[in-house]
Image (cartoon, coloured by chain):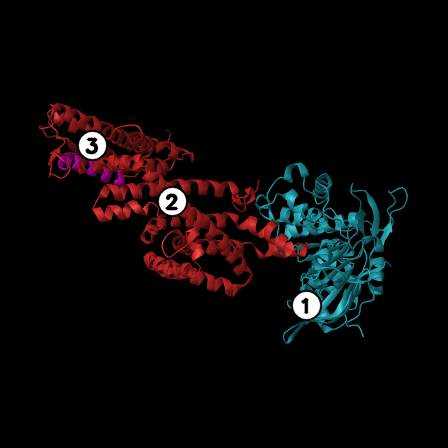
């Protein structure tokens, strides 16, 4: 397990009578994606904004790489932390390239290095630099703007990326595509990402660890699977939804229940699928999750179901007995004790 | 001219009205006033008058002058598209140039022939005809613009006949010998003594200094108000109240403190600071010019989205960098609009500076009022209007060229 990079040490933020964040203790590890989630007003955005000191804690400390954040001027701290927000906030009077290059410019990189970095990042977020470099934000779609926003946050290669509901204002299809893109980008850049959302589906998809907050308090901090299998209390159980087990199956790769096809690939132990209608039996892609597998198995009338690779070649089988045995072993609990 | 689909056909009431004015002027108003000396009550001659013996066919001349107006009247009353606008424009231009260019030779010929006395001046008919044809020309431009998709530079080109007359008038003042055009004659007298040049210089100086001060102070207050809501409220209220004060009252109120100041420190008089003169005038003008600059600076800065500000702060910009890299570039077009309003406002109000001895073109206007001389009023007013038009044009061009390209694009254009 990697080292802690961001540590909340007894952090409280008080607004008048109200405690927006109440004695938060949280350790975020390097290279992980930590999603802060909870209902409106739970303090998740305030917690995020305390990391780069857009909000100053009333008491307690936040340590980054072991050093308290109030040890350096706020501006200097923020230039080392990428920041992406829901409204994107691209500067409308600047081109895409100028927007992406703003932090390198602030910290004084030479222009040729900024230019090279801008092109590299635009390519990384899936925008052709030659086409988009000199466009203005108003010429881009919402999804394209948010890609530029992510590129801008990564510009000076900060170790930490803060994302405050970055995909909240996008339509569902664009949102899903950008989530996939973020996962892909994260595999390349390996940043520590702190991500705020109120969408549990988004959290489960992106997070290495999820911090569930309520009324300024941290209720549960765990991996997505653990939160689904063992919710800490009634609130978490309700928050993740009654279909939490099905959601959890969506996190498990299909290999866990797959019986690999025998060497020559033609071997077909067991009876062939019996489908009353005579239609082609459903198959499951090898990259799918247990949730998709279950769906296909039900479609096939609980008969054995083929797992296929990209070219449609059968790489394995899901068998009813194996599936049931695996399901029975899952450590599901009503509410953690 | 091909007419774009869906272009509406419409009447040009404005064009018809202008044409009607010309017809009335040609038919019924005195064209030339003739008198043996400037003080005598002269006789008024209609353009068709047979006593203009040089024109054996006075009626023919009148008909020629009225012909474009008659044509414009017919065109203006019919529903038509862009071509009608071009006809109106052509009629207005022809009429304007015909009236302007023929009136001086007419008087010269009349004098030579002995039918006109020494002092022969343009009558109200000439002026009204010029105005009427000007209206027809303008109506034509409006009609063309409304009916057809035209390049933005076209209307400027279409004003060329008017520009020609202005330049010709200037040439007559400097080089020529305006005979019957009493306005140009007075202007020429003043130009030869160097008076009008000096007044224009004073006027430009008064308005430029006070506008510069207004802009500097107004932008500073606008920025301060952006950071402190209360300051903005008070500043907008106070500068609004100042603008409602009668100019004369404001100037008069400023005389007293400046007089007291000059009495207390007589050395200041050496710099021209006293109760009378430019100092209180510039102070008053500066106060008048504050509102548009403060209001537009404040509104322009407020117009920057919260998301852009949050992003700027979150990326580690200092307050100074946020102001100069984000807020001001974004607000610049709005601020420039305020600067333009202030400049035009001050060029106008500066005509009142002479009331407290501040100089400027108001000198002629006051002189004209005292002497009941329309000519003097006009040689004060017309240059002031021309200066305002030119400054407005220059500042709007400057404003457009300072607007960052990313802000000129309309929102939601996907390329």
Which is in the foreground here, disc 3 or disc 2?
2
The chain drawn in red is B
Q: Which residue is mark 1?
A: A43
Left of B270 or right of it: where is A67? right
What range is drawn magenta here? Answer: B13-31
- Helix, strand or loop under label 1: loop
Q: Chain of mark 3?
A: B
- Classify mark 3: residues with Cα within 10 Å, few (<14), some (14-19) or many (20+): many
A326 or B54: nearer the viewer:
B54
Q: Which residue is mark 2?
A: B202
Residue B50 position within the rendered picture, expressed as x and y whole percent measured from the top left:
9, 28
Residue A39 position within the rendered picture, expressed as x and y whole percent measured from the top left:
66, 67
B199 or B334: nearer the viewer:
B199
Q: Which residue is mark 3?
A: B180
- Classify mark 1: residues with Cα within 10 Å, few (<14), some (14-19) or many (20+): many
Corner quadrant of residue A133: top right
Q: Chain of mark 1?
A: A
Left of A285 or right of it: where is B323? left
Q: Marks 3 and 2, how far apart in space?
A: 30 Å
Q: Is residue B100 above or below residue A151?
A: above
Q: Residue furthest bottom?
A: A17
In the picture, the quarter occupied by the C terminus of chain A is bottom right
Residue B14 part of the magenta-drawn span? yes
Q: Chain of mark 2?
A: B
- Classify mark 2: residues with Cα within 10 Å, few (<14), some (14-19) or many (20+): some
């Amino acid at each position: 397990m990697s080292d802690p990079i961001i540590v909340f040490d007894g952090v409280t933020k008080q607004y008048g009578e109200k405690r927006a964040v109440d004695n938060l203790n949280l350790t975020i590890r390097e290279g992980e994606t930590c999603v802060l989630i909870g209902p409106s007003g739970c303090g998740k955005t305030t917690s995020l904004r305390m990391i780069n000191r857009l909000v100053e804690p009333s008491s307690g400390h936040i340590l980054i790489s072991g050093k308290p954040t109030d040890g350096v001027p706020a501006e200097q701290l923020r230039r080392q932390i990428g920041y992406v927000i829901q409204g994107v906030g691209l500067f409308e009077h600047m081109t895409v390239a100028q927007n992406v290059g703003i932090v390198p410019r602030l910290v004084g990189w030479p222009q040729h290095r900024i230019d090279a970095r801008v092109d590299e990042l635009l390519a990384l977020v899936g925008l052709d630099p030659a086409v988009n470099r000199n466009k203005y934000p108003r010429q881009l779609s919402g999804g394209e703007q948010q890609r530029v926003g992510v590129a801008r946050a990564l510009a000076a290669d900060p170790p930490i990326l803060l994302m405050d509901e970055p995909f909240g204002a996008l339509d569902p299809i664009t949102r899903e595509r950008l989530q996939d893109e973020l996962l892909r980008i994260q595999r390349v850049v390996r940043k520590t990402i702190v991500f705020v959302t109120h969408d549990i589906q988004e959290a489960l998809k992106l997070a290495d660890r999820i911090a569930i907050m309520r009324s300024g308090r941290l209720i549960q901090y765990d991996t997505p699977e653990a939160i689904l299998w063992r919710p800490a209390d009634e609130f978490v159980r309700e928050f993740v939804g009654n279909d939490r087990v099905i959601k959890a199956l969506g996190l498990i790769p299909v290999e866990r229940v797959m019986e690999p096809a025998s060497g020559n690939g033609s071997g077909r132990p067991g009876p062939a699928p019996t489908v009353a209608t005579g239609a082609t039996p459903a198959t499951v892609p090898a990259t799918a999750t247990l949730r998709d597998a279950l769906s296909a198995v039900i479609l096939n009338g609980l008969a054995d179901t083929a797992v296929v690779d990209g070219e449609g070649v059968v790489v394995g089988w899901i068998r009813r007995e194996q599936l049931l045995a695996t399901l029975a072993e899952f450590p599901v609990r009503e509410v953690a004790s | 001219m091909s007419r774009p689909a869906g272009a509406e056909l419409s009447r040009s009431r404005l064009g018809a009205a202008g044409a009607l004015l010309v017809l009335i002027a040609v038919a019924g108003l005195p064209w030339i006033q003739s008198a043996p000396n400037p003080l005598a009550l002269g006789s008024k001659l209609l353009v068709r008058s047979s006593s203009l013996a040089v024109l054996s066919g006075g009626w023919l001349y009148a008909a020629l002058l009225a012909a474009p107006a008659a044509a414009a009247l017919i065109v203006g009353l019919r529903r038509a598209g862009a071509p009608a606008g071009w006809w109106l424009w052509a009629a207005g231009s022809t009429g304007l140039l015909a009236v302007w260019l023929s009136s001086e030779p007419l008087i010269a010929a009349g004098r030579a022939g002995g039918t006109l006395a020494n002092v022969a001046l343009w009558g109200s008919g000439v002026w009204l005809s010029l105005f009427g044809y000007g209206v027809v020309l303008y109506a034509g431009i409006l009609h063309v613009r409304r009916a057809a998709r035209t390049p933005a530079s076209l209307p400027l080109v279409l004003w060329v006949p008017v520009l020609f007359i202005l330049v010709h008038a200037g040439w007559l003042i400097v080089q020529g010998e305006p005979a019957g055009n009493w306005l140009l004659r007075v202007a020429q007298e003043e130009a030869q003594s160097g008076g009008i040049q000096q007044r224009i210089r004073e006027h430009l100086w008064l308005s430029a200094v006070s506008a510069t001060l207004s802009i500097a102070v107004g932008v500073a207050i606008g920025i301060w108000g952006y950071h402190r809501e209360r300051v903005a409220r008070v500043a907008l209220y106070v500068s609004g109240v100042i603008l409602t004060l009668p100019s004369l009252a404001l100037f008069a109120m400023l005389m007293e403190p400046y007089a007291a100041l000059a009495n207390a420190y007589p050395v200041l008089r050496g710099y021209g600071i006293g109760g009378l003169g430019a100092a209180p005038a510039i102070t008053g003008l500066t106060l008048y010019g504050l509102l548009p600059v403060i209001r537009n600076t404040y509104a322009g800065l407020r117009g920057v989205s919260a998301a852009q500000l949050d992003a700027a702060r979150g990326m580690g910009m200092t307050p100074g960098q946020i102001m100069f890299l984000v807020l001001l570039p974004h607000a610049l077009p709005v601020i420039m609009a305020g600067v333009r309003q202030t400049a035009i406002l001050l060029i106008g109000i500066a005509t009142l500076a002479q009331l407290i001895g501040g100089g400027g073109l108001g000198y002629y206007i006051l002189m004209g009022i005292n002497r009941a001389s329309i000519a003097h009023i006009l040689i004060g007013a017309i240059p002031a209007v021309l200066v305002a038009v030119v400054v407005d044009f220059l500042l709007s061009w400057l404003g457009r060229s300072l607007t960052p390209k990313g802000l000129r694009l309309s929102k939601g254009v996907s390329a």
